[in-house]
């Protein structure tokens, strides 16, 4: 929910040189992730959500690491596909009829209807939101689970290094706005 509309176009102007320079810095150990920039994004009822804006280099490095272990991660959470989470539709069916906006709207409509049905059969219906969820995730725990799922200690350590830089100064939490 936070995007810089011109970043891709700017980087594409000199993409090969930019990627070559980043690769050189990664290989020499000169690369270091930058802290994320927090931007308050409005949400319902006049609340704000702290979204993270990551440096483009950090996004490239993070994406490369995740893509390296994507199949392991997908296999580890396959049990939840189509029953608990629905993000699988973003990759499984890339046709124009499979738009996230339509899915999200349908999902919320279904949820509202389900609450009404439950209210007819129950004395109470509780609706809640876990406030501050992402910004309070324990980095050591999530990277430990990541290493267990992927069986890649090296990549898990690199992901932890990135997340720690983005979690300054609190030393906990995951950036919001990135899968």
Image (tube, rainbow, N blue to C red):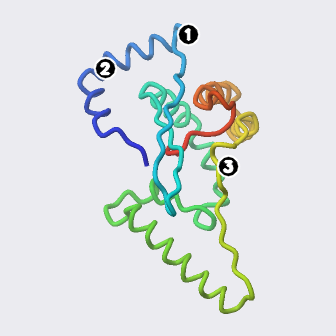
For the residue labelled by badge 1, is the local secondary structure a helix, a strand or a loop?
loop
Q: Mark 3, mark 1: which one is toward the viewer?
A: 1
Residue for badge 3: 76
In the picture, residue 173 is in which quadrant? top right
Establish if 93 lies above or below 165: below
User: Between 14 and 137, which is closer to the camera in this rendering?
Assistant: 137
Residue for badge 1: 29
Bin the neighbour count of mark 3 within 10 Å (Cα to Cα): few under 14, some 14-19, many 20 and up.
some
Distance of label 3 from label 1 (alpha carbons): 31 Å
41 sits to left or right of 129: left
Q: Mark 3, mark 2: which one is toward the viewer?
A: 2
- The image position of residue 47, as x and y in percent, is 53, 56
Q: Residue at x 66, y 85 (%)?
A: 118
For the residue labelled by badge 2, is the local secondary structure a helix, a strand or a loop?
helix
Q: Are marks 2 and 1 in contact (CB under 8 Å)?
A: no
Q: Are marks 3 and 1 in contact (CB under 8 Å)?
A: no
Bin the neighbour count of mark 2 within 10 Å (Cα to Cα): few under 14, some 14-19, many 20 and up.
few
Establish if 85 lies above or below 133: below
Q: Residue at x 60, y 25 (%)?
A: 165
Residue for badge 2: 16
Q: Residue at x 50, y 38 (%)?
A: 52
Residue found farthest to the left: 13
Distance of label 3 from label 2 (alpha carbons): 34 Å
21 sits to left or right of 76: left
Establish if 37 lies above or below 106: above
């Amino acid at each position: 929910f936070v995007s810089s509309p011109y970043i891709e176009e700017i980087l594409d102007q000199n993409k090969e040189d930019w990627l070559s320079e980043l690769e050189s810095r990664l290989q020499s150990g000169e690369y270091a992730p930058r802290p994320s920039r927090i931007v308050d994004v409005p949400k319902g009822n006049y609340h704000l959500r702290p979204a993270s804006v990551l440096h483009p280099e950090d996004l490239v490095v993070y994406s490369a690491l995740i893509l390296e272990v994507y199949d392991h991660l997908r296999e580890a959470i396959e049990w939840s596909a189509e029953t608990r989470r629905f993000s699988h539709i973003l990759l499984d069916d890339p046709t124009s009829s499979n738009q996230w906006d339509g899915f999200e709207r349908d999902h919320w409509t279904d949820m509202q209807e389900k609450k009404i049905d439950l209210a007819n059969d129950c004395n109470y219906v509780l609706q809640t939101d876990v406030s501050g969820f992402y910004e309070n995730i324990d980095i050591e725990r999530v990277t430990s689970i990541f290493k267990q799922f992927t069986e890649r200690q090296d990549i898990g350590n690199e992901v932890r290094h990135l997340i720690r830089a983005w979690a300054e100064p609190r030393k906990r939490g995951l950036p919001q706005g990135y899968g």
